[in-house]
Amino acid sequence: MARSSKPKLAVWKFASCDGCQLSLLDCEDELLAVAGAVDIANFPEASRTVVKGPYDVSLVEGSITTPHDAERIHHVRRNSRYLITIGACATAGGIQALRNFSDVKAYTRYVYASPQYIETLNKSTPIRDHVFVDFELRGCPISKAQLVEVISALLNGRKPNTPTHSVCLECKMAGTVCVMVAQGLPCLGPVTQAGCGALCPSYRRPCYGCFGPKETPNTAALAAGWTELGAGDPEIVRAFRSFNACAEDFRRESEAHER
Amino acid sequence: MKGKVIKVDTLARVEGEGSLHIKISDAGVVDAKFGIYEPPRFFEAFLRGRSYAEAPDITARICGICPVAYQMSSAHAVEAALGVTVGGQLRALRRLLYCGEWIESHVLHIFLLHAPDFLGYEDVIGMARDHRPLVENALKLKKIGNDIVTLLGGREIHPINVRVGGFYKVPTKRDLEPLAERLKWAVDTAAGVVPVLAGLPFPDFEGDYEYVALRHPDEYPFNEGRLVSSKGIDIPVSEFESNFVEEHMSHSNALHSVRTARGAYFVGPLARYNLNADRLSKRAKQGAQAAGIAQGCNNPFKGILVRAVETIFACEEALRIIKEYEPPGEPAVAVEPRAGTGSACTEAPRGILYHRYRIDAAGLIADAKIVPPTAQNQKTIEDDLRRYAAPRVDLPLPDLTWQCEQAVRNYDPCISCATHFLKVSVERE
């Protein structure tokens, strides 16, 4: 069949909210085109079809939080030519990595009636801590435009073009007035990677860091700026400790402000 | 046929990771399990110590399909704790936001997740090869829902513009106007597909369910109302936990939410519709007539029709709100932290979503409880599976398997949401 000559795309889910893989189904204008350009070989959220590997491209969503998943990711890697991680969970451990700063046993007792049945790892870790990753797409959730860019880059054999600069640059390009300078609102934009289109400042609220740290962020300088604006240490800790809490730069800065 | 086991390790076309395990012996179906192996994510635990203001952003991350539902339930529950009421156009905008989520979620479920079952396709891509105009219209319809969420919320997944007390920024009349023409098309298109969907082959299968939904004095419910049931409940939302409890079943690791001393209940479109059909818009009522469910609907397979009827309603309601919209003076009402406890239910596309928070004097969350719709439907899903499989055990295994999968997909289970129960399916003997 002619179909078999198309690249095989697989989508895998680990601990996550499904939002990043849903981004693919939310590409209403591009969905049928993408589906025409690849063979969707494994994408449980969208299809019952399961085609055996190896796969040309695997999109991996979610973080590793169970012993079983720590095994499963190796299976995905072995069967994938390119492995792309999508979203804050897969690239930084996600919101569920908040457990990494706490006692997971206490968490389990709090949430579950019979904690002895719950099998979970002490930490939630990004995919790259377990296997080699070819490309990481940031965001909680990822940007649809960036996802389409990555898929099309792979299909055309070129490097994906996604920025590593800060949200501030997106604000400037959009002509959005700086919420930190003009309104004195503590904003994570200066240390956060672009990709969302500087969404929050355009809605008159400060950036809360969905895309994780930019390349070479000066988190200490930003935290000092926050302190000048009246933010206390607990507030700074919470700001760095959300959807990308275990991205290295954010983790270190949050720990520096813990009592 | 004895000794037959239906095992689906990964349920397709649902959100999150679930499995299906049905065991059949000489005596018939002896066990049916809708399994959840989604890893726990501990939201209720790590919400403690966070600011009340963070609840809508954090809880949105429970679910990528229905983040608005989490934002709405958390905002309303926190507002209840802090004694804040959001009315007027801000309230209307919240309804509009929910219309957007219902449209995108219902259309996603109807056409991308569920309809392929009835028509015998593995997925929407296969369906699109034979039914291209239908799928293209569905995608266009879904995009309108997403565009409403994007306009009001900033983006369709994990919106950023929702806050306790209202929004960060409200749209102008002109911002909303371009949606109106598209919504008129959407009402007609949604109404037009109802008879098509009504022609799908539905199995003859009904149940004597206890439906539970919100009921509002004069609106089809989104964010507010009393909790009512088809078997006599009529309580304020604050009494949820004395009427519904999460039980730890001895045969599994799953926590089921059950009606105290009574057992399974049913939330979601079917429940909403059966309890609130009189509150629907005119076109939606006509849609129900065209779908043949005007007298009510007790067949969960026909949930796909109810979703289509609710899609008509959501499009019309969005249109009404846009027509009557006048921008409020402030994007949010003032909120001051204080100690208190508050709870709220809102109608997620899949059914009532309950949140309760205890907040301390500094505005930090001291305690959180979240009961998602899928946790509430899980027991009903298993009951359905047992009843549905029983007279069909002689079907060829692949057919029976697919049909049982469909019985689960009737509920549009949102398994990522339901991570606060975890279940491992074990075959005994």
Image (cartoon, coloured by chain):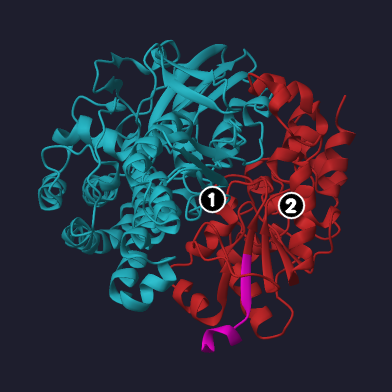
The chain ID associated with circle 1 is B
Q: Secondary structure at mark 2?
A: loop
Q: Chain A's colour? A: red
Q: Is residue A52 above or below residue A127?
A: below
Q: Chain B's colour? A: cyan
Residue type for callout 2: Gly
Taking the spot 12% from the left edge, 45% from the top edge, the residue there is B285
Which residue bears the numbered disc 2?
A212
Residue type for callout 1: Val
Name the side, left or right, on which A143 lies relative to A192.
left
Name the side, left or right, on which A132 lies relative to A240.
right
* Residue A64 appearing in the image: no
Which residue bears the numbered disc 1?
B8
* Residue B2 rendering spot, x and y as whole percentages: 46, 43
The chain ID associated with circle 2 is A
Q: Are marks 2 and 1 in contact (CB under 8 Å)?
A: no
Q: How far apart are the two marked residues, 2 and 1, measured between alpha carbons?
A: 37 Å
Taking the spot 34% from the left edge, 72% from the top edge, the residue there is B136
Name the side, left or right, on which B82 lies relative to B58.
left
Name the foreground residue: B166 vs B39: B39
Name which quarter of the figure residue B250 lies in: top right
The magenta segment is: A1-10
* Residue A224 rendering spot, x and y as whole percentages: 84, 39
* Residue B28 rendering spot, x and y as whole percentages: 40, 36
* Residue A98 rendering spot, x and y as whole percentages: 75, 35
